[in-house]
Amino acid sequence: MSYTSAYIKRGKWYIGWIEEVPGVNTQGKTLKELRSNLKEALVLVLEASKEEIKKEHPRGRIMREPLLLNV
């Protein structure tokens, strides 16, 4: 999968977010640290989303398929 990270520098910190996924944002003292933190935050948000769906539909059969999108 591919996502778009965006960032700005504020003082001594880099502030970053993933444009396609609301709520995935973090900071880092270096761009390397920011990128690592963004990856970790994205994984956590995606995993939490899957867990929430499982809680909402504990007995339901969830059907999944790839969704391709070119923006």
Image (cartoon, helix red, strand yellow):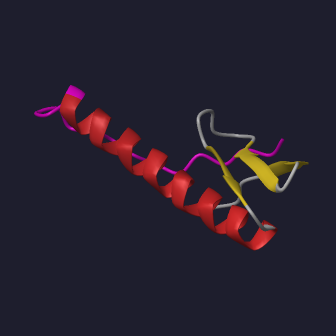
Q: Nearer the viewer, residue 62 or 52?
A: 52
In the image, farthest residue toward the top: 56
Q: Specify the segment rendered in magenta.
A: 56-71
On screen, residue 38 above or below 17: below
Q: Residue at x 78, y 68 (%)?
A: 30
Q: Nearer the viewer, residue 31 or 46?
A: 31
* Left or right relative to 33: residue 37: left
* Left or right relative to 65: residue 68: right
Instruction: Name the main secondary structure of what is drawn in magenta.
Output: loop
* Left or right relative to 48: residue 11: right
Residue 62 percent coordinates (x, y): 28, 39
In the image, farthest residue toward the front: 12
Q: Residue at x 75, y 41 (%)?
A: 19
Q: Is residue 5 visible?
A: no
In the image, farthest residue toward the left: 59
Q: Nearer the viewer, residue 10 or 22?
A: 10
Q: Magenta stretch: residue 64 in it?
A: yes
Q: How many marks?
A: 0
Q: Residue at x 20, y 33 (%)?
A: 55
In the image, farthest residue toward the bottom: 32
Q: Magenta stretch: residue 58 in it?
A: yes
* Left or right relative to 24: residue 35: right
Q: Nearer the viewer, residue 12 or 71?
A: 12
Residue 66 percent coordinates (x, y): 53, 51
Location of the C terminus by quadrant is top right
On screen, residue 34 above or below 52: below
Q: Residue at x 75, y 48 (%)?
A: 16
Q: Is residue 44 visible?
A: yes
Residue 57 percent coordinates (x, y): 20, 29
Location of the N terminus by quadrant is bottom right
Q: Quadrant of residue 63?
A: top left
